[in-house]
Image: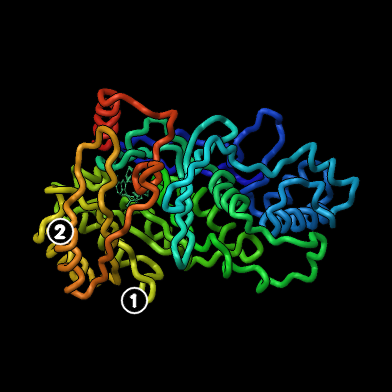
């Protein structure tokens, strides 16, 4: 087995409840292979008694069946000897997250409430539009941060999702959308990589914008996305994947170097006072530090711009002065930037309201006239609470008093 991934210690901060091992334990004692790199699958096969050479070969075959074919039953792996298949089934499993509930929005958005093998609930959302289909993937159960406008931030229970639980979301979406190759399942040798691409599929893009802060679960997110981008894995281009962070500055460089996907930054405010209030991680890593890290982000260019997310909160961060200051900051750091204006999605007990459409338009125009694209995002899936920041599992509905207590605890921990 490879080393257990360590959770990053963040001083003065509530760390996620650690996942003791990269594979979540199952009641039946079998090991889940989903989300493990080929090498680790081979070493598990070796630990279970295969010799080195056979372990390597079987791992290659199994990996291919898992990610190119979506197969989760060893019996369907026709190029593996018949006698070998029950041996695998006894010891291993290729699991999917358990689906507790699937909801369809009137606008085509789909939301799934999922459960881990050790009974933690989390969510994922699929958002189709004319040109693409975007899967919004969670990285943690809940979030240790407490952005005041975000429903996920009011959840207390937090644990990092394992690579398997993260890749599992993509696998499940492919299952649900019927996107695995059909037809003969035993002609593996004939298939070339070019036969396997995102083209023509419903699921074309991935955004790490579900529950959680992906850069507080760096190792697992990196390993999961490694499989999603692997040509022998799910083979999705890194240009179609975006990771959104609230601004975990010390991890941004590694994100560019080791993951290499597009970056989105939840900026939301242009002054220290307001950002301290609505995105409390700002007290640790301030706006200027964050923008410098963006300027240094490996791989950012005019062709691959950084997205700045900006939630529109009435009378809080939405004035014309705020828009001018945003432009000034983005220009000061010469950032290849685009701005995504997100109308605030309300939730019960939320302390803010959404800006008026006129205000949002005026804000957008100012940014746009400065030469920076600033589209207003259409909220999707509002009727099923699937819109940005509304993800919060049914199991976690709390009273207002309890929400205030959790917020106070998290803020105290940020110091
Ligand atoms: N933790 C990461 C990624 C998940 S949040 C981050 O904060 O970037 C994905 C996006 O939704 C972020 O930009 C977040 O600020 C935004 N968001 C959260 N709550 C929202 C709400 N109620 N309305 C609109 N956008 C929201
Ligand atoms: Fe966490 Fe992102 Fe929500 Fe902030 S906006 S609480 S970082 S999920």
Front residue of 28 and 174: 174
Name the quadrant containing residue 228: bottom right
Residue 409, labelled with which disc? none
Tell me: is circle 1 under 8 Å from ligand 1.
no
Residue at (64%, 60%) from the top-left corner? 233
In the foreground, 244 or 355: 355
Locate residue 141: give its quadrant. Answer: top left
Q: Are marks 2 and 1 in contact (CB under 8 Å)?
A: no
Q: Position of residue 297 (x, y in %)?
A: 36, 65
Query: Which secondary structure, mark 1?
Result: loop
Circle on res. 302 = 1
Say above or below: 156 vs 34: above
The label nearer to you, 2 versus 1, is 2
State the separation of the CA atoms marked 2 and 1.
30 Å
Among all residues in the image, which is located at the extreme front? 106
Among the two numbered marks 2 and 1 on one chain, the one whose residue lies closer to the N terminus? 1
> How dense is the environment of label 1, judged by Cα within 10 Å: few (below 14), some, or many (20 and up)?
few
């Amino acid at each position: 087995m490879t080393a257990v991934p360590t959770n990053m210690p963040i001083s003065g901060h509530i760390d996620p409840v650690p996942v003791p091992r990269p594979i979540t334990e199952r009641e039946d004692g079998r090991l889940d292979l989903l989300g493990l790199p080929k090498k680790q699958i081979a070493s598990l096969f070796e630990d279970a008694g295969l010799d080195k050479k056979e372990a390597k070969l079987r791992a290659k075959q199994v990996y291919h069946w898992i990610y190119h074919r979506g197969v989760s039953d060893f019996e369907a792996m026709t190029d593996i000897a018949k006698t070998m298949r029950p041996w695998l089934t006894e010891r291993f499993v290729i699991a999917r997250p358990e689906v507790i509930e699937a909801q369809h929005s009137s606008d085509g958005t789909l939301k799934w409430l999922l459960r881990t093998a050790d009974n933690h609930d989390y969510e994922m959302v699929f958002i189709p539009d004319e040109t693409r289909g975007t899967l919004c993937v969670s990285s943690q159960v809940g979030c240790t941060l407490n952005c005041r406008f975000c429903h996920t931030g009011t959840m207390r229970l937090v644990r990092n999702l394992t690579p398997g639980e993260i890749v599992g979301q993509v696998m499940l979406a492919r299952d649900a959308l019927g996107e695995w190759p059909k037809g003969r399942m035993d002609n593996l040798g004939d298939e070339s990589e070019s036969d396997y691409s995102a083209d023509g599929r419903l699921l074309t893009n991935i955004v790490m914008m579900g529950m959680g802060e992906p850069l507080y679960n760096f190792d697992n997110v990196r390993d999961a996305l490694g499989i999603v981008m692997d040509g022998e894995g799910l083979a999705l281009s890194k240009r179609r994947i975006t990771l959104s962070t609230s601004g975990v500055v010390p991890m941004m460089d590694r994100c560019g170097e080791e993951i290499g996907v597009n970056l989105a930054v939840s900026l939301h405010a242009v002054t220290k006072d307001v950002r301290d209030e609505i995105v409390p991680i700002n007290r640790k890593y301030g706006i200027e530090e964050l923008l410098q890290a963006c300027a240094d982000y490996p791989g950012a260019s005019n062709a691959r711009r950084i997205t700045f997310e900006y939630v529109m909160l009435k009378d809080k961060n939405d004035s014309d002065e705020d828009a001018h200051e945003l432009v000034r900051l983005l220009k000061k750091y010469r950032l290849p930037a685009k701005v995504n204006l997100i109308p605030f999605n309300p939730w019960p007990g939320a302390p803010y309201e959404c800006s008026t459409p006129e205000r949002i338009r005026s804000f957008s125009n100012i940014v746009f006239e400065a030469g920076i694209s600033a589209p207003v995002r259409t909220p999707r899936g509002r009727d099923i609470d699937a819109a940005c920041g509304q993800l919060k599992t049914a199991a976690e509905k709390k009273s207002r008093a309890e929400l205030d207590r959790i917020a106070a605890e998290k803020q105290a921990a940020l110091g």
